[in-house]
Image (cartoon, rainbow, N blue to C red):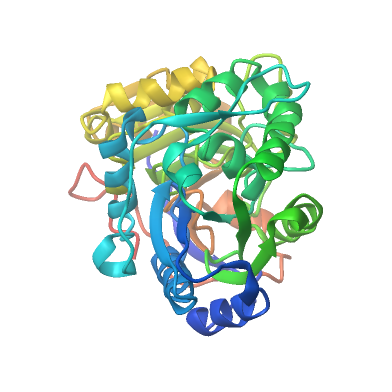
Amino acid sequence: MPFPPLTKIRQSLTSERIDDIQGEVEHQFAQVAGVIQPGQRVAIAVGSRGIANLTEIVKATAVWVRSRSAQPLIVPAMGSHGGGTGPGQRDVLEGYGVTEAATGAPIVSDMSVVQLPAGDLPVKVYFDRNAHEADATIVINRIKPHTDFTGTYESGLMKMLAIGLGKQRQAEAIHLHGVPGLRQIMPGVARQILAHANVVLGVAIVENGYEQTMRIEVVPAAQIPDREPALLDLARRSMPALPVDALDVLLVDQMGKNISGTGLDTNIIGRKMIRGEPEFDRPKIKTLIVSDLTEPSHGNACGIGLADICTRRLFDKIDFNATYANVKTSTFLERGKIPIVAEHDREAVEFALDTLDPIHGQEIRMARIRSTLHLSEMYVTSAVLRQMKDDPNVEVTASPITPFENSNELFPFG
């Protein structure tokens, strides 16, 4: 089957954003000045996601802590990520640019935890020992829809309190209960931590459709459970999506932990792949191809099982120890399965096209995106373009291009 030409388009997404990140962080902290006292050691909890302006936000937080004559330190709050080791989690932070040199705060990273009262919860409650031994803890995280479930609390401050700061032991304890553990037990663990640990503030971040910071709120610890649902609703309304409900083939240039906890955001691709959990209503994608793994993932290809085909280039970058540590903790084994491995992009696309209904002919509905985090620009076939002809948020920005001319690899995204 011949390769159908691809036309570059741009779709308009939610664009509200903050231009002065440092100024907004300073403004937010000015409203809670009395929370930190002189001489205190303050743990700043930072996770393993690729958040826009993360280093700048962490630095501004550390600067504010020092302005209160207190001493900041950074602790990783990422459950089992980074291979489930202290050095691995430090590497993840430093890969995002969160270093002592950049933020002015040392990173203290190991997997030790303390146990806190669990109340009537069916799991034990753990909390990062280094944060516990500090005088106060500030939690920084982006709030967005989760890739595994829907609920009052999804990916955000509550989840970071429970699974992130609980390190691998808490992540495993909650994930052993599957999706009900995330939806029902995780918020209870977070509430126990808020009641019995030294958490004083949360820094909530919401991003627009272009992966830009649109909201930063410093929330007193006691108000986090009440405030987070509204911010989650804002994030859900602002997140991007594919402009059509069905595709024969979706080409994804990169997956990775800095893009989504599952490498590929399940909300975007319409695939959850969790036993017993219903799949999304949209979009419906027949064949999903992933070409590469991002460097900040450090070989963690958790979520690779969401794809149908990957390239040899991606496969050769997989660190199976890091990937399987993450998959085992999540308990969602399907997401760790290896898809068909093609030697290069051309073979991957050929394989996908050869599985299509031959009656489909020239009506192949195919799209190419950079990642599930970057949806403002993409390439689509004429069949997809026709579906969007009346969409005022979509415009054509370049002439059609044949995917492969004299190369086995896709042309640069451009």
| The quadrant where residue 300 appears | top left
Q: Quadrant of residue 141?
A: bottom right
| Residue 258 image offset from top left, x and y in percent | 41, 48
Query: Given the current orientation, which residue lies at the most extreme front position?
Result: 39
Most foreground residue, 397 or 144: 144
User: Which residue: 73% across, 43% down?
Assistant: 153
Residue at image location 60% in from the left, 42% down from the top = 161
User: Would residue 268 be found to the left or right of residue 316 on screen?
Assistant: right
Report the residue at 26% width, 28% height from top: 319
- Residue 334 location (% of width, % of height): 51, 17
Image mark count? 0
Q: Position of residue 98 (x, y in %)?
A: 33, 59
Q: Is residue 36 left or right of residue 89?
A: right
Q: Is residue 250 above or below residue 304?
A: below
The vertical placement of 161 against 203, above or below, is above
**Residue found farthest to the left:** 406
Of the 4 image quadrants, the one containing the C terminus is bottom left
Quarter holding the N terminus is: top left
Q: Position of residue 328 (x, y in %)?
A: 45, 17
| Front residue (pair 366, 126) | 126
Name the residue at 28% across, 53% down: 94
Asked whether residue 321 is in view, the answer is: yes
